[in-house]
Amino acid sequence: MNWTKLSERIAFDGFRKVIQKTFRLPNGKTATFDTISGGSFVTIAAFTKEKEAILVKQYRPGAEKALVSFPEGGIEGNENPIDTAIRELEEETGYRARKFIHLKTFHWAYRVDRRICLLAIDCEKVGEQQLDDTEFIDIITLPLEKFKSLLTNPVDESFNTVDAGFLALHYFQNDDNG
């Protein structure tokens, strides 16, 4: 695919940045695309020793309703993604994992950063939440079978880290430790 970037400019600089990128397309025409930069982040598919999923429920301004997900958090500077996961899991839930496993790194069509999915296994409650001023998070734990039902329920629109859920289940299904 022969795309050539001709220019790039920040169109909006707020909590997220909108970056307009202009390309020469393979057919010789030019097109401008809006991309979003919000910083790379981790999604932590966290499970207790008993294989209970550790989920967070919080209001999300885009959807204008509470959504359920695995814990997530932004990678700060050159921070190692596993260090981010350790910090975010403990801050958002009070849990600490025995082990982290890289599941997959995602890139999006219209975002410039990346999302790194990690599996956190054998999590134990070690403290209380340490939330930022703008975070209001309820912790939900679900046994594996109930989590599978949430993950595959076509009517439920609240769970939004479905891909990380399936990657975690795949790991458990194919690993001797699962």
Image (cartoon, rainbow, N blue to C red):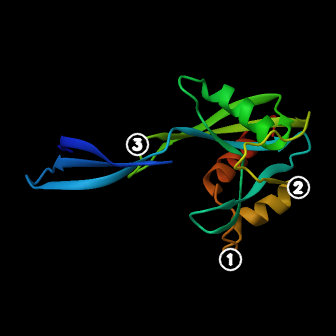
> Residue at horizontal 19%, vertical 42%?
7
* Mark found first going from the N terminus, 3 or 2: 3
Which structural element holds mark 2?
A: loop
Q: Is mark 3 on a helix, strand or loop?
A: loop
Q: Where is residue 47 in the image (x, y as percent from the top left)?
A: 82, 43
Disc 1 to disc 3, C-alpha distance: 31 Å
Q: Vertical placement of 69 versus 133: above or below?
A: below
Q: Name the residue under label 2.
A: 143
Q: Where is residue 101 in the image (x, y as percent from the top left)?
A: 69, 32
Q: Which of 64 and 163 is in front in this view?
A: 64
Which tag, 1 or 2, sits closer to the chain's start? Answer: 2
Q: Give the mark nearest the N terminus, 1 or 3.
A: 3
Residue toward you, 95 or 106: 95
* x and y percentages locating residue 65 in the rendered image: 67, 69
Q: Which residue is at 84% across, 60% downward?
A: 145
Q: As displayed, is residue 138 above or below residue 45?
A: below
> Looking at the picture, which amino acid does disc 2 mark?
Pro
**Label 3, label 2: how many angstroms apart (C-alpha)?**
35 Å
Q: Residue 140 in the image: state x and y as whole percent.
A: 85, 55
- Callout 3 amino acid: Val
Q: In this view, does 30 lie to the left or right of 132?
A: left
Q: Nearer the viewer, mark 3 or mark 2?
A: 3
What residue is shown at x 74% (from left), y 46% (from top)? 173
**Res. 170 mark:** none
The residue sitting at the left extreme is 28
**Which residue has dot 1 on it?**
155
Q: In which quarter of the image is the C terminus?
A: top right
Name the residue carrying label 3: 112
* Amino acid type of the residue tagged 1 in the rendering: Val
Residue 106 lies left or right of residue 152; in this view the side is: left
Q: Distance between the residues labelled 1 and 2?
A: 20 Å
Seen in the picture, residue 57 relative to 49 is either above or below; the reply is below
